[in-house]
Amino acid sequence: MSANIKNENGFIAIENNVIANIAGISAMESYGIVGMAAKNATDGILEVLKIDNLSKGIKVNTENDQIDIILHVVLEYGVKISTVGENIIDRVKFNVESLTGLSINQVEVIVEGIRLK
């Protein structure tokens, strides 16, 4: 599914994977985040994703030009989880809204793990 923007000249369609990439890059700019997480469905093994596969740890739902984003993250040990989560939400919301022109309904951060440096 994609988000659509209508103007006087036609439509602009923004695919969910583009929104997921923007959200992933935005989240990685936040202090205290190690990376995005993806679970191996067969083993339940936590995998930290590299910059090329950030969108695999992000789920984007677009309905009626409202965007819901769910991020699965791994944080650094010793950071305050609530503060880092709020920073990720603020940064993702700001960047996605400013780059796409669409409004974010909800950003959810799910902490999948903590990693020691």
Image: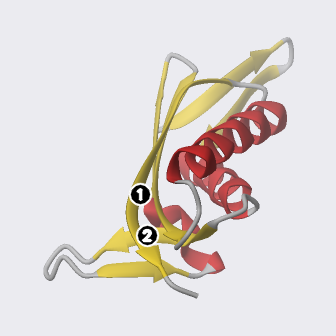
> At which x and y percent is residue 9?
86, 19
Q: Amino acid at mark 1?
A: Val
Q: Amino acid at mark 2?
A: Ala
> At which x and y percent is residue 83?
61, 45
Disc on res. 111: 1
Residue drawn at point x = 56 percent, y = 47 percent: 85
Give the CA distance from mark 1 to mark 2: 9 Å
Quarter of the image for residue 26 reads bottom right
Of badges 1 and 2, nearer the viewer stands 1
Helix, strand or loop for disc 2: strand
Helix, strand or loop for disc 1: strand
Q: Nearer the viewer, residue 108 or 9?
A: 108
As drawn, 94 above or below 117? above
According to the picture, the residue beneath numbered tag 2 turns out to be 37
As drawn, 97 above or below 19? above
Residue drawn at point x = 45 percent, y = 66 percent: 56
Residue extending farthest to the left is 42
Quarter of the image for residue 113 reads bottom left
Q: Residues within 10 Å of mark 1 (few under 14, many from 20)?
A: some
